Amino acid sequence: MKPTRRSWAEPFKIKVVEPVRLTTPEQRLRAIQEAGYNTFLLRSEDVYIDLLTDSGTSAMSDRQWAGMMLGDEAYAGSRNFYHLEEMVQKYYGYKYLIPTHQGRGAEHIVSRVLIQPGDVIPGNMYFTTTRLHQELAGGRFEDVIIAEAHDPASEHPFKGDIDLDKLAALIREHGRERIPYVSVAATVNMAGGQPISLANLQAVRELTARHGIRIILDATRVAENAYFIQQREPGQQGRSIASIVMQICSLTDGCTMSAKKDALVNIGGFLGLNDQDVFEEARNLVVVYEGLHTYGGMAGRDMEAVAVGIEESLDDDHIRARVGQVLYLGGKMREWGIPIVLPIGGHGVFIDARSFLPHLPQEQYPAQALASAIYLDSGVRTMERGIVSAGRNKETGQENKPRLELVRLTIPRRVYTQAHMDVVAESVLSVFEGRAAVRGLRMVYEPRYLRFFQARFEPL
Ligand SMILES: *Cc1c(COP(=O)(O)O)cnc(C)c1O
């Protein structure tokens, strides 16, 4: 018999605490000016509650910290590599493991191995680093996510699904020779942490198998995706998160993983593969770019923490509390009439900045302006996911203008309490009430790649 649980309350208690600093409005104004109105350029010491990202910001468990002491720092053949390999095989089912320093290391390698110049890579919405590595390898990303994903008000339960007609049309147009793989993300970060359904993934598998096209999974948040399948997809209730994750992976040919998300570590990643020839190519490249194939840029202790973290990430009680906290924050904001992306995603709450600040045109970076305003109000750090993140078109040099103009409140795993979530919701409400006074921004410095990380702005 399963124990009965009424709330999403965390299945852990707190053993170590890290003090955070409260700041004055004057201190925050100085800090955001120095940061060029880009929350990525704030010093963490000037931040009270940090919802910039859930990447590498998880609190590790006592078991993970104990694992760090078991680091085998041999250059070759570390015991921790074999433990990690065993966990990847056991929980994700891939035959071969290539460790990398983080997710983009895996993206770099798989893109170089599989993509030829002129290739087209369909996927369920782009992710910044994933698409950039596909482009640097000479490929072009084509978005085949369902239309509902671009509509912040649509309550489709699986906004990460792929539009099968669009995918079939791309295959007809370019042929399997020009499509090395379909890039499937679970969940879809840029759509607001929205899941793909098992049924849709199965249909994508059938279609691609007919043409001999691979599927490479972005498994960064696959446990959170599995939770939504368990909660929402007909016939999936009562299944364990671990068994759903295993099934998702079994429908794909390999994965890139940023272990800094689901897997509850501060650094690490890997490439999981089933094809021996692809694995051998990837193993050749990892030595050039990351490190020997039995550490790939991670210390032995880091690999141990990932190995333990994978197991913890697939625990049903963990994932229920993790997503439960996100739903709690989003539910509050929704109740108060703040425009957010629905349904609420797995790793964060996404504010619809276009509806929040209707007086600001997209050229004035409304989501960037809103993230600054929230920081100024309370010291809560969020980030832009809109026109700044979307960058410029490679051919025309024009700014890409995504339909979604979002501010992301990303919740680190096992770090903040319910009271912190209340502070966040109340701060967003106070900015919402004074939203008419929020001014747009002008970009005064623009880096060439991934400009959202380092761009600088001034208020208009
Ligand atoms: C973070 C992330 C990546 C890249 O991983 P890093 O570890 O940051 O290099 C890739 N895909 C998704 C969906 C991510 O969220």
Image (cartoon, helix red, strand yellow):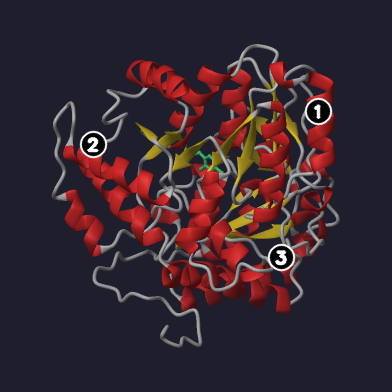
Image coordinates of residue 178 in percent, x first then y, are 71, 17
Nearer-the-camera pick, 35 or 223: 223
- The kind of residue on which mark 2 rests is Ala
Query: Residue 170: which numbered mark, if any?
Result: 1
Kindly identify which residue carries mark 2: 299
- The kind of residue on which mark 1 rests is Leu
Closer to the eye: label 1 or 2: 1
Q: Earlier in the sequence, mark 1 or mark 3?
A: 1
SS of the residue under disc 2: loop
Picture layout, residue 41 above or below residue 313:
above
Queried on whether the Cβ of the residue with tag 1 lies below 8 angstroms from ligand 1, the answer reads no
Kindly identify which residue carries mark 3: 343
Is 460 situated left or right of 426 in this image? right
Image coordinates of residue 216 in percent, x first then y, are 57, 35
Of all residues, the one furthest to the front in this rendering is 210
CA gap, disc 1 and disc 2: 42 Å
